[in-house]
Image (spheres, rainbow, N blue to C red):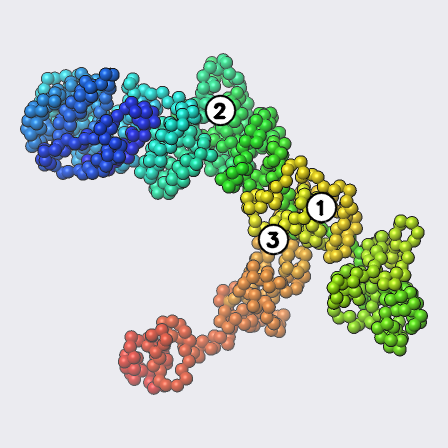
Amino acid sequence: MGRYISSLAATIRQVFAVIKLLFRGRVKLHVVSYKDYCDGKLVVTHRSQRTHSNKQILEFVADLVPHGGGDIPEAIKTALNFVHSTVNSIREASAMSTEALVLIFTDAPPHHSHTLSRYWRHERDAIQTNPTYTAGYDWLSIRRAFQVASIPVFTFHSNLDCAYRTAQSVLFYSALGPVVLVENESTTEITKATMGLLLQLMGHKFEFSDLFTCVRVWADCAAFGGDAEDAVFPDVDARLTCTRLPFQFDALPWMDEDVSPLPALFETNVEYQRMVYHVFGALVTPTNVLALTYNPILAKLWRLICKRRSDPRYASLTTTLSLCVPALTGLDKQQVQQWIHNESHAIRDTIMALTHDIGSSDRRIIVLERNTLLDSVDPADLRSLARAPTPNAIRTVQSILTHLQLVTLDDDRPTDGLIDRDGVPHFLPLDLPDIKLFSFLCHLVAPGTVFSVRGSAVVAMLCVSSNHSIMKDRAHDFLHSIRGTWLPLDVATDYPEILSVEYIKLLHRHRQFLTPNELVVYDRLYAMHRMRLAATKDVDVTVGATPVKAQLRLDIKAKCLSCNTHVSVSLMTTKDLCAICVEYGLADARAIQRKHITPVNKSHMVECTVCHCLYAVVQPELLNIAPKCFYCRQWVKPRPIAPVVECVRCLNKYLDPAHLIEAPPGDVGWTCTPCIAVAPQAATMVKTVPFKTIMESNLELSREFGWTKPKRAQEFVDLAFNQHTNYFKLYTQHHALLFGVKPAQTQRHSQDKVIVVLVDGKPIHDAESLCKALVFNVLEGSLRDVCNLCFEEFSLPQLDSACGRCPTRVCQGCIGQWYGEVKIGRVLFTSHLTCPFCRQKPQPSVWLRYNKAARELATSPMPAMKANAYYGWCSTCGKIKEMMPKSCARDVPRLAKYECDDCIAKSAIYPQCPRCKVQTERIDGCNHILCICGQNWCYACGEEFESADSTYSHMYRECQVGL
């Protein structure tokens, strides 16, 4: 009985749950425990819901201990008389008709002359002397008493030590009613069998009936019609056998309870909701959670709970459930995990309700044309669609959509071949509600799997975007019907998946199904997502050419009346005096001018690195630092503004301290000499600049990407390019900054403002066209490029500069493999110490990212290497040494732990400690070495010893060198 007792608590908890939730107090549970008369006078003990609380009953069960007994039979006759008497007492005290049901859990026969009983007289005397025990001692008398009282009896009987004894015991209990043979005595199986019986008695199908079996010994129950048990039951030596029967039972009329009102009751009755949550709070434990998989009543209520995700009690239960599942093992764990996602019952009920009256419903149905690709679909991939519509999940769903077929039902056998043996349909009626139609689609490929509302919405969007002929119209209607209800942005912390990159991209493509507030959120996040992708995108811009100081450039000059020399107007302090004369005096100025004679229309020009104006230098050989004009070199505050004139063609600014440059009449503006004398392109140059650099230098461009707060543009740009802040954090932690604008204000900005874009402080040409191209390329263009090593296409964030210095981009895998070739103990190829393209040394950050171990080697001076020899990185000394001439090796040496000749020779000179392998040098003394690791050994031969004495003995006998 030990197994029965240990499983009884789990069984009773489920019974409590069912009778409380389904019968709501109309059914009471009694637990009766019986022993044998050798175990004391208190043979029968009991607890009842009529007189005790559920907690007291569970405590009573927990205290039960199986006893060995004096013989095999037990006092079941006494227990049955007590049960019969109790039922009669309840019926007499009740004004209403009362029904009863008895479940017996046993592993022993009753007392009988044929069951080797020693205590049958004790039980007979106890029953005969108790006036309330009217069923009597005789087994057939007890049978008749329960039949007269209309008390059905069901027995759960385990196997005994041999089949014959099992059959003999089963024969007794089969006289009372059906017997279930318990072959697996685990708590889970006993509880499952018990609930399977009760569910069938209540009129519910039990899906695991094939796991259990009923048994009987005699096929004809009329054999039990005798007057006394001694004349009916065979002798103990009879060779009886059990016949197996299906685990099937007819419903008892008084237990047949309709569960169809439960959903409405749960939705409308707050008190019933509270009771359901309370019951499940006690039921969801590792011991009892498996009941959800085979108890349809509990499963139905759990599905109702799962529909109320916003209820805080739901979060508590799911947390508890998530802790229960890992505590399970093996098949139990797998069964719970599969059940959690299985909705076969709901699908069957919904579809069959529509197809019950085939004449009044749409005769068209949707079926799936299966193929080998669909057979390999994992239900977990389908369920992941609601959490993250990744390309893999979308590809799987699209494969389902492309294999849908619309057919019309036949008149004679409309659903022939479309319903499996469990009654689950494998088709979808076209007149299903939209929400059910899209939710049940994955059931066609993974039976029992359904999409949540968000998953259904994603499927509908795929139907719209792919222009699905069967589903597109229904998809439009469905998405419009749930508009504004399925994206819980107000509680986004509970649903972080709706702010994933996948959702942002998908919803941007289907903006027409979003509310204005949702549009603000997803448009902003999509723009920031695209800006991040485009951060490293190269943008070609045209700016005024930067002169090179060593080259002469066309210039405007004026004659200085002091030194009588034509000087660039950028060096004239007045219309008659140059800065050279002012700075050096007349004599030195003339000497300088004579030494640096230039043509009358050309000068050595440079560009100020601060204000970016162009000015002339007379002594270019002395300019060894970044050029700065006179005004930008002043250490005064406020710094004086350099007087400049801007060319209307190349947009370069020229320094004009004396205001000698005169613009032509009209509004055409001034044109510099290089632009007049040469083609305008000669005075400009094209620069390649990353998109991120342009945005960081021109914050006002953020308005082109929907930003409406100019004063906080810096924060917007910083967040847009911060790869460490995901979109969930953008929404939750920066909500006021990014989304604190009414939808009507998002498009309102100054349209007529002149757009000025600067790159390195210089205005770019045709800024308006550039801005339009930027917006288009960033928000709608392909932000992908090709790796210059493997020539595969990647998104821009997956491509990096090959060395951190040159613009050539490679994928992270290729660049990691390139620099990863430099390994200690291997052949060294010096080409892998430099960029594969520009041959410059990579920046230190590149080595830190891809090969930290080689950073010091790569930044240290390399020894002179011969072209006709292989070199290796010594694993001992860490230096680069010659390995062998190339003529000596047909192929490249494949070494994993190269050691140079010097290190090999050194290790041969200095022997190693036999324990710790540390090289040891003997400076003086004898050959006895006591290593710091504690090992005694001989320096001459390297042999190890346990003590100093044994070492010295060895040295005197064998190694006499160096004594």
Q: Earlier in the sequence, mark 1 or mark 2?
A: 2
What amino acid is labelled 1 in the image? Leu
- Which residue carries the number 2 mark? 427
* Mark 3 neighbour class, 10 Å CA radius: few under 14, some 14 to 19, many 20 or more: many
Q: Secondary structure at mark 3?
A: strand
Q: Earlier in the sequence, mark 3 or mark 1?
A: 1
* Mark 2 neighbour class, 10 Å CA radius: few under 14, some 14 to 19, many 20 or more: many
Spatial CA span between label 3 and label 1: 24 Å
Spatial CA span between label 1 and label 2: 49 Å
* Relative side of 935 to 151, left or right: right
Q: In the image, which disc is placed on residue 774?
A: 1
Percent coordinates x, y for residue 603 in the rendering: 86, 66
* Residue 226 higher or lower than 286, as above or below: above
* Residue 826 higher or lower than 760, as above or below: below
Q: In the image, which disc is placed on residue 184?
A: none
Q: Quadrant of residue 505?
A: top right
Quadrant where the C terminus is found in the figure = bottom left
Percent coordinates x, y for residue 910 in the rendering: 43, 78
What amino acid is labelled 2 in the image? Phe
Q: Which of the two residues, 838 or 185, is positioned nearer the viewer here?
A: 185
What residue is rendered at 35% in x and 82% in y?
927
- Which residue carries the number 3 mark? 811
Asked if the residues shown at circle 3 and circle 2 are in contact, with their CB atoms under 8 angstroms apart, the answer is no
What amino acid is labelled 3 in the image? Cys
